[in-house]
Amino acid sequence: MCNAVDRSFLSDRLPNPYTIRDAEDWLHRVSQNESVSGIYRAIVADGSVIGSISIERKEDVFRIDGDIGFILLDEYWNKGIATEVVGQLCRIAFSELLLERITANVFQPNIASMRVLKKNGFVHEGTLKQAIIKNGILYDLCIFGLTKNCRNPVNKTKQ
């Protein structure tokens, strides 16, 4: 799945190509950090892994904030799956990690991810101009935030 996903707007943190060793390293990290400093989930449909989502607590004075990231195979885009799993994981992270906010960093052209976040109550808090580079191209970085106590769709849904 990690080799088949569209990498256009992903961090270079995800190795390419993604090897068995990379998967083993990731699963070890998940096993060490699950419900301690992060929440990690596979996205499954029809018995197959079609994506991944995580929220990882930041460190130091930022420890009340978590970074969210998600990937989904493109044949499952525009079906409401990402919107649903983002909402579910945010509820879990606020509860289990005791976060006050969740932050999403989105490449400026990634309108689909911005739409998913907005549907879950995330607010565009600002844009860092020419803040990231991917494949030799400079991109603006849009910062989205969701706070635990704000009134938004993610907090209105029952767990």
Image: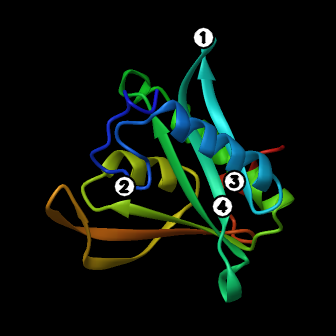
Residue 141 picture quarter: bottom left
Q: Nearer the viewer, residue 73 or 110?
A: 73
Find residue 49 and report its horizontal and vertical position in percent: 57, 23
In which quarter of the view is residue 63 placed?
Answer: bottom right
Q: Where is residue 107 in the image (x, y as percent from the top left)?
A: 31, 60
**Inter-mark Cα distance, 1 to 2:** 29 Å
Q: Name the residue under label 1.
A: 46
Q: Position of residue 120 (x, y in %)?
A: 58, 52
**Tag 2 or tag 3, which sits nearer the N-term?**
2
Say left or right for 109 vs 45: left
Q: Earlier in the sequence, mark 1 or mark 2?
A: 2
Mark 1–mark 2 CB contact (< 8 Å): no
| Residue 56 badge | 4
Q: What residue type is labelled 1?
A: Asp
> Of callouts 1 and 4, which one flags the residue occurring earlier in the amino acid sequence?
1
The one of 33 and 58 positioned closer to us in this rendering: 33
Which residue lies under the disc numbered 3?
90
Q: Residue furthest top?
A: 46
What is the secondary structure assignment of the residue under circle 1? loop
Question: Of circles 4 and 3, which is in front?
Answer: 4
Separation of residues labelled 2 and 4 (CA atoms): 17 Å
Report, in whole angstroms, how far the alpha carbon at label 1 lies from the one at label 4: 27 Å
Q: How far apart are marks 4 and 3 (CA)?
A: 11 Å
In the rendered structure, which disc, 3 or 1, sits on the residue that comes first in sequence? 1
Which residue corresponds to mark 2?
12
The disc labelled 2 sits on which kind of residue? Asp
**Callout in the foreground (1, 2):** 2
SS label for mark 2: loop
Residue at x-position 32% and y-position 42%: 7
